[in-house]
Image (tube, grey):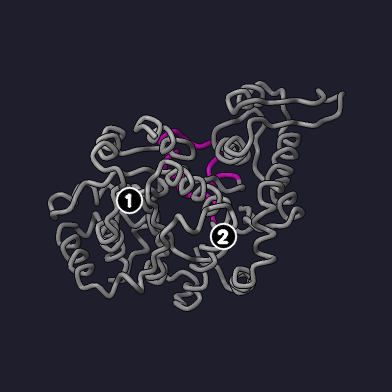
Amino acid sequence: MDIERKIEIIMRPPTEEILTIEELKNLLESNPHPIAYNGWEPSGLMHLGTGLICAYKMKDFIEAGIKFKAYLATWHAFINNKLGGDIELIKKAALHFKHGWISLGVPENKIEFIWPENEYNDIKYWEKVIKISKLMTISRAKRTLEIAGRKEIEVNKVADFIYTPMQVADIFQFNVNICQLGMDQRKANVVAKELGESLGFWNPVAVHHHLLQGLSEPPVWPIPENMKKEILISIKMSKSKPKTCIFIYDSPEEIKEKVKRAFCPEKIIEFNPIIDICKHIIFRERNEIIIERPQKYGGRLEIQSFEELCKVYRDGKLHPLDLKNAVTEILIEILEPSRKYFQENREAKETLEILKKATITR
């Protein structure tokens, strides 16, 4: 596969940003077998964002011939007090995440799953953490904490301040050339890019993917231009708000009810969660959306691209309810293998049952 084709695959949506394309091209020219990674705090059930969006990018990198490491960051979840800080429950959630991606078609034999219990016994890792910490100011450490879903005013423990140095150290400990994380992880990846070479390491490429929007109305609507970036991060799909997210093993009835209640303003494309799902999931999985409706409301409508969907919807030629009905049926079909997997795989089913009883935090 030539380099241009590899770059095309890596840039495939839901990729939203690459820092930088030129650096990525240089890396692929100089290193035939680079390593990419993503890391997650195991913190509860798996929704479309953590599940499908991340699975798409893992499969993209595998297709492009790049080794992919999936880091199950249990210690980071512990620092962030996920699942009440219960480390054993966090480990169950990590195993649950692993099963989730496998259920969505990520080939287990082509992904390296990393556990901190195996990596953090190495004193050289902690040497990296200290060196990175010495080059970061307190104010910058606070600013990066949106990667942990925190606001600066919530930072009151010493452990909070080592979260970002640990995440940056992970990159170099795992020999990562490409950081493939969500847009909310951007600040930590920029720290790695800025400090890597001065620490005797390297400047990793950062590939950031889109944060799938939750189903609820944004807290401010319409959204002021100067608040768009801030609001987008705050409204991403979150497992701590179960009524505003779709889990990968939700029943058809649950999917129907959640989509039915979802925010979907008529003729509005931007910050519309149903349109967001169409762009990043439906048209990733399908070449068209077929809208079945009575003849008196326009009859059957076949939409061949996301661009066409935007035009039809913006022009008022497609009602939100008709779009919701079509999206519901497609999501039910897409998630059928995952529902079946979690019913039939004993270990996966066990983790799901345990986490359904747990109190999910942030």
- Please report the bounds of the magenta region as a residue range: 217-238
Which residue is tagged 2?
A: 100
Q: Amino acid at mark 1?
A: Ile
Q: Residues under labels 1 and 2: Cα distance? A: 22 Å
Q: Earlier in the sequence, mark 1 or mark 2?
A: 1
x, y percentage for residue 112? Answer: 41, 60
Q: Is residue 261 visible?
A: no
Answer with left or right where residue 222 lies relative to residue 70: right
Q: Is residue 110 above or below residue 65?
A: below
x, y percentage for residue 118? Answer: 34, 72
**Label 1 crowd bin: few (<14), some (14–19), many (20+), radius 10 Å:** some
Q: Residue sitting at 55 percent across and 39 percent down?
A: 280
| Quadrant in which the N terminus is drawn | top left
Q: Residue sitting at 69 percent across and 32 percent down?
A: 289
Answer with left or right where residue 259 lies relative to residue 207: right
**Label 2 crowd bin: few (<14), some (14–19), many (20+), radius 10 Å:** many
SS at badge 2: helix
Q: Is residue 258 above or below residue 133?
A: above
State which quadrant residue 291 falls in: top right
Q: Is residue 305 visible?
A: yes
Q: Residue sitting at 47 percent across and 77 percent down?
A: 86
Q: In the image, which disc is placed on residue 48?
A: none
Answer with left or right where residue 113 lies relative to residue 326: left
Q: Residue sitting at 19 percent across and 49 percent down?
A: 202
Answer with left or right where residue 242 lies relative to residue 69: right
State which quadrant residue 124 falls in: bottom left
Q: In the image, which disc is placed on residue 35?
A: 1
Q: Are dots 1 and 2 in contact, CB under 8 Å?
A: no
